[in-house]
Amino acid sequence: MKKIFFFAFIFCSTKMYAQKFEGLALTPPMGWNSWNTFQTKINDSLVREIADVMVSSGMKDAGYTYLVLDDGWMSRERDSVTGNLVPDPKKFPNGMKVLVDYVHSKGLKFGLYNCAGTKTCAGYPGTRGYEYQDARFYASLEIDYLKFDWCNTDGINAKEAYTTMSKALKAAGRPIVFSLCEWGTNKPWEWAENVGELWRTTGDISAVYDGYIDHGTWKQTGVMPIVDLQKGLRKYAGPGHWNDPDMLEVGNGMSVAEDRTHFSMWCMLAAPLMAGNDLRKMSKETQSILTNKEAIAINQDKLGIEGFQYEDKDSLEVWVKPLENDDWAVCFLNRSAKPMKINHNWKDELITDPLFHKTMNAKEHPYKIRNVWAKSNAGDTQKPLVAIVPSHDVMMLRLTK
């Protein structure tokens, strides 16, 4: 009898700690991350200014909740007595808890970064061997989000490392969104649904529309190649477990059309929306893109279904995404260097999503059309859609029965 009880206890305990917190990130997380613009040049005053402008700019009202400090927030060595991570005293002279409290006072949530390896990508102390201690430290700070990178991990098994950290977060007792920044190297979409709330599907993004930035030993991937790398992954995504094609580069050097395309595709892909620009200096165009609530509503749709490419004709792609209440999002994407004409007869197109058992039949059921970027009504599906899409731009529509 004792043996049976002991086995049941071990089994229940293992099962309990193997599962992540339930009910987190039921829609793709939205927020801001420091890395794309600031890398390790972060400090207390920057965080406070970003928190302030997230509120004043309308970002918070649009749904951006998490303010995440990336690599470089800690000292080069752990505390010699406790072994805890130590916030850099020059960058954060008042410590981290005071800063977390300030961000929380703005109605925002706070996130930190670390790495599954022995050191972070910038050479700061990693978490390998300190998973449970670091999880307790994060819980004591009352953070809400952990981005967990994959540098300096030679000889480490990815599934084991991330599962261990997930168990540590659960054991620490504070619900923290767990972002697996594993770059897609070990196909986390196949095993991470019960480990974290989102997982990177690619290497780092760059603020280029197409192509790569070559750093010699590694490459940053452009927006369109990242979109292409999402093929075949949509079946793994849904409420509480998201494919993550990396942070947004809106406002970081591409054209307005390219930024709009970038944001639209992340909305269609049900991707996390983590802004990566300097919010204090963003242009009106950048602010308008990042806070377009109609586009964001497509991203945040409660069904949590990732969109897919329905058609590709001469670099004019048609992407579709099933939404709640039998609505659909349709995005015409012009990847070419010249304007492209749309001549789309809705009644001739029976759009089906066999994976999620959704069908759009405009011949039997007319839909009203809303142009998401023009923020205007655009008739209905009784008539063909005839329009011009500029180079590297999109026409994004919401169809409602």
Image (cartoon, rainbow, N blue to C red):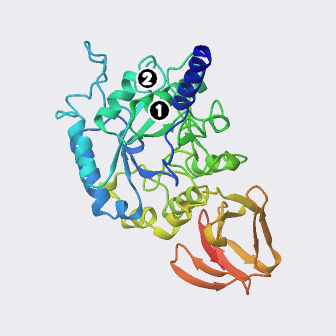
The kind of secondary structure element at disc 1 is: strand
Q: How far is mark 2 from mark 1, CA to CA?
A: 11 Å
Q: Position of residue 78 (x, y in %)?
A: 30, 18
Could you tell me which residue is drawn at 35 percent across and 28 percent down?
136
Residue lying farthest front?
Answer: 1
Find residue 131 and name its label. 2
Instruction: From the viewer's side, name the closer residue of 52 and 210.
Output: 52
Q: Which residue is under mark 1? A: 148
Instruction: From the viewer's side, name the closer residue of 240 and 242.
Output: 240
Could you tell me if residue 280 is visible in this image? yes
Q: Residues within 10 Å of mark 2 (few under 14, many from 20)?
A: many
Q: Position of residue 221 (x, y in %)?
A: 58, 42
Q: Residues within 10 Å of mark 1 (few under 14, many from 20)?
A: many
Could you tell me which residue is drawn at 69 percent across and 63 percent down?
319
Q: Position of residue 363 (x, y in %)?
A: 80, 81
- Amino acid under label 1? Phe
Compared across the picture, whether 159 is left or right of 43 comes to: right
The reply to whether callout 2 and callout 1 are in contact (CB within 8 Å) is: no
Mark 2 or mark 1: which comes first in sequence? 2
